[in-house]
């Protein structure tokens, strides 16, 4: 049986336009959100906002997080 997870998405009321490579941005978002869902216990929050001239994308889950000893290596290639 698959466990149920609640995904909360908070979007601004107005449309936000950004200049980016849509394929790369889409892949990055899919990876980050998928990891949030995969490792969450029950909740994932996704919030998009505009601050000054920047777009802020926040993804938060209630999972255990990355072990402290692995943090220095999170950007190392496999």
Image (cartoon, grey):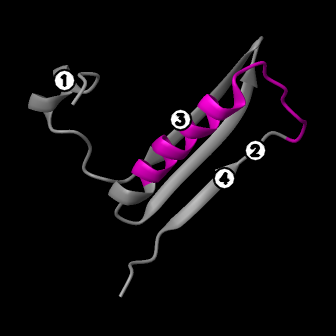
Say if mark 2 contacts mark 4, CB within 8 Å: yes
Task: Give the mark, 3 or 1, whose residue is nearer the N terminus.
Answer: 3
Residue 28 is marked as 3
Taking the spot 69% from the left edge, 36% from the top edge, the residue there is: 48
- Region in magenta: 13-36
The residue tagged with tag 1: helix, strand or loop?
Answer: helix
The residue tagged with tag 4: helix, strand or loop?
Answer: strand
Q: Residues within 10 Å of mark 3 (few under 14, many from 20)?
A: few
Q: Residues within 10 Å of mark 1 (few under 14, many from 20)?
A: few
Task: Give the mark, 2 or 3, whose residue is nearer the N terminus.
Answer: 2
Residue 45 location in percent, x, y? 55, 50
| Residue closest to the eye, 60 or 76 | 76
Q: Depth-wise, is mark 2 or mark 3 nearer the camera? A: 3
Where does the C terminus fall, quadrant-wise? top left
Q: Name the residue tied to disc 4.
A: 9
Residue 24 location in percent, x, y? 60, 29
Q: Name the residue tied to disc 2.
A: 11
In the image, residue 40 sits, relative to residue 2, either above or below, namely above
Where does the N terminus fall, quadrant-wise? bottom left
Q: Depth-wise, is mark 4 or mark 3 nearer the camera? A: 3
């Amino acid at each position: 049986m698959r466990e149920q997870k609640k995904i909360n998405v908070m979007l601004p009321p107005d449309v936000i336009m950004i200049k980016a490579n849509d394929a790369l941005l889409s892949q990055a978002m899919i990876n980050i959100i998928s990891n949030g869902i995969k490792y969450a216990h029950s909740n994932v929050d996704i919030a998009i906002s505009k601050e000054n001239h920047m777009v802020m994308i926040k993804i938060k889950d209630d999972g255990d997080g990355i072990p402290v000893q692995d943090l220095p290596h999170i950007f190392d290639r496999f």
